[in-house]
Amino acid sequence: MSDPGAVLADLRDECDELDGLVAGLPAERWAAPTPAEGWTVAHQIAHLAWTDRQALRSATDPDGFRRAAREALATAPLTFVDDGARTGARLPPAELLAEWRATREALLRALATRPDGGKLPWFATSMSVTSMATGRLMETWAHGQDIADALGVTRTPTARLRHVAHIGVRARDYSYAARQLTPPAEEFRVELRAPDGALWTYGPPDAAQRVTGDALEFCLLVTQRLHRDDAVSVRSEGTDAERWLGIAQAFAGPPGQGRAPAGGGRTGNGPAGDGAEDGPI
């Protein structure tokens, strides 16, 4: 996860894959509702374009970004992200798609020229270039899942999921903090089966609290695109591990509504996830 060039290449590929999913849609399909309540396909792309624009400003005009972020957090802390999506969704689909393409390309170029050792300002935090690119990839993948679900498309999982899993594991303590809970003091062991059959591992091998399962399901779970009851391959050992899986979120911001259980999955094994929409990452 330390090579910004590799992460930026994966971010480009993730964006291109989603672009291919929406590029040929007729205008009326951009109004199709997605699982995020009140958000259409257009809202999803508008949100990505808006957030990429904020990241671009952070990389090219950090002082200007800080001023704008302070104003947004002071005047509309709970709505400014959704406001950006609503504004963009009003554009004609071709114009919205062109804006997202131009903004994400400018962001990729800007991040490629920044030294990874420096920090980029973000909402209530700061990030390295690698962290910013990883966050943008995670969000593109997650909102791409919303769009794929709206269109009835099954996407083929790729090795790029490793970036999403990485954030999901690292954000464990934030998942507790977002709910005013105290995270466990000990580390967890996480073992995930990658799309190519490899094993992705995190945490000490001898940890008492453990999570194992399919990497795709884990990524859907931590981005709250899958209810805990339906993550049938993701298993826990230990009360704290199961508790985390019920509240896990790989995104910043307050927890939201979350996906409802589809039925027929797990039952009676921990709390349901709380959040669906991501705030500023």
Image (spheres, helix red, strand yellow):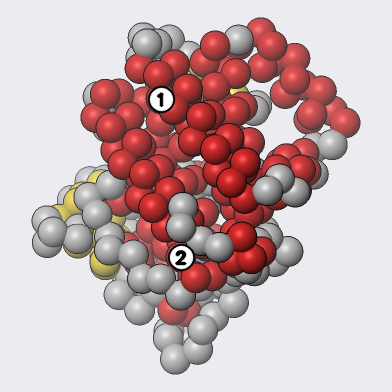
Tell me residue 12's x, y (percent).
Answer: 34, 36
Q: Residue drawn 75% across and 14% down?
A: 67
**What residue lies at 28% left-to-right and 47% top-to-bottom?**
160
* Of the pair 39 and 242, the residue shown nearer to us: 39
Give the quadrant of the N terminus: top left
Above or below, 131 relative to 111: below
Q: Residue at x 62, y 41 (%)?
A: 95
Residue type marked 1: Leu
Q: Secondary structure at mark 2?
A: helix
> On the image, which quarter does residue 112 sit in?
top left
Q: Give the residue pinned by disc 1.
A: 108
Dots 2, 1 in contact, CB < 8 A = no
Q: Residues within 10 Å of mark 1 (few under 14, many from 20)?
A: some
Question: Is residue 90 positioned above or below 230 on the image?
Answer: above
Is 3 on the left or on the right of 238, as rendered?
A: left
Residue 42 on image: x %, y %: 63, 54
Image quadrant in which you'd find residue 30 = bottom right
Q: Is residue 256 visible?
A: yes
- Between 188 and 10, the residue placed more toward the observer is 10
Q: Amino acid at mark 2?
A: Ala
Residue at 78% across / 30% down in the picture?
73
Left or right of 65 in this view: 250: left
Work out whether 26 lies above or below 52: below
160 versus 243 height, above or below: above
Circle nearer the N terminus (2, 1) = 1
Report the disc number at residue 148: 2
Left or right: 46, with 17 as reference point: right
- Nearer to us in this view, 156 or 63: 156
Element at label 1 = helix
Residue nearest the observer in this picture, 171 or 173: 171
CA separation, marks 2 and 1? 24 Å
